[in-house]
Image (spheres, rainbow, N blue to C red):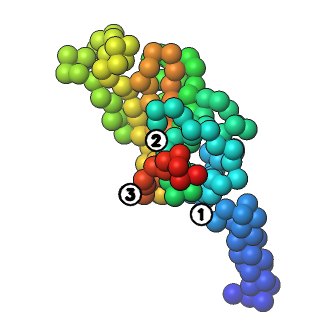
Amino acid sequence: MTMLTTPLLMALALLWTGVATATGEPDCAKRVFGQYCLGGDASALELTPVEGAEGRFTDAAGNPDTQLDIAAGRITAVERRVEPGGWREYDVWKKRLERLYRSGLNVSTFPRYAASRSSQLNAIRSGRGSARTDWPQTGWLLSLIWREPEAIHLRYELDEPGNQPLSVDDL
């Protein structure tokens, strides 16, 4: 290396580390929906527990259709409900995500008899099936889920074993 490139490389390295620490969230695996830091500290958020779902909360200052999973004071998952639902919307979202993350893994769960799209739709409507595509990334997982007729869900989740949900009493 020459004397000219060494200071430039050092400046770029400092800038890079400064960007990571400027957010104050060095444990941030992924910025989600421009608002939440997957793996980051949840203590600054105004959390409201979701009734009947241990460890799941909504942020009073955020989108009411967005739910957060919190474990040990960290955001372990962020899920947003997007309307409308349907095969067409599921396919549109899937194509958008494939442009960003390439092909996903189909991990849909349907009864054996549900081989056609119409029978899979009936299984979703009756609560016996769901369409799901996962995009595993380093340190986190993105899932596109259609489990209710009216909406599709986008879920970002830390890819760490042992994420135990936080109860309301732990806040």
Residues under labels 1 and 2: Cα distance? 23 Å
Residue identifier under label 1 = 27
Residue at x 56%, y 28% (from the top left corner): 81
Pointer 3 or 2: first along the chain:
2
Q: In this view, does 30 lie to the left or right of 71?
A: right
Circle number at residue 162: 3
Check the image and name the residue furthest to the front: 169
The amino acid type of the residue labelled 1 equals Asp
Pointer 1 or 2: first along the chain:
1
Residue at x 70%, y 53% (from the top left corner): 44
Circle number at residue 87: none
Check the image and name the residue furthest to the bottom: 3
Q: What element carries label 2?
A: loop
Residue identifier under label 2 = 54
In the rendered view, would you say 94 is above or below 123? below
Look at the image and tell me whether residue 52 can be seen. Answer: yes
The foreground one among 5 and 13 is: 13
Q: What element carries label 3?
A: loop
Residues under labels 1 and 3: Cα distance? 17 Å
Residue at x 68%, y 48% (from the top left corner): 45
Q: Which of marks 3 and 2 is in front?
A: 2
Quadrant in the picture for residue 147:
top left
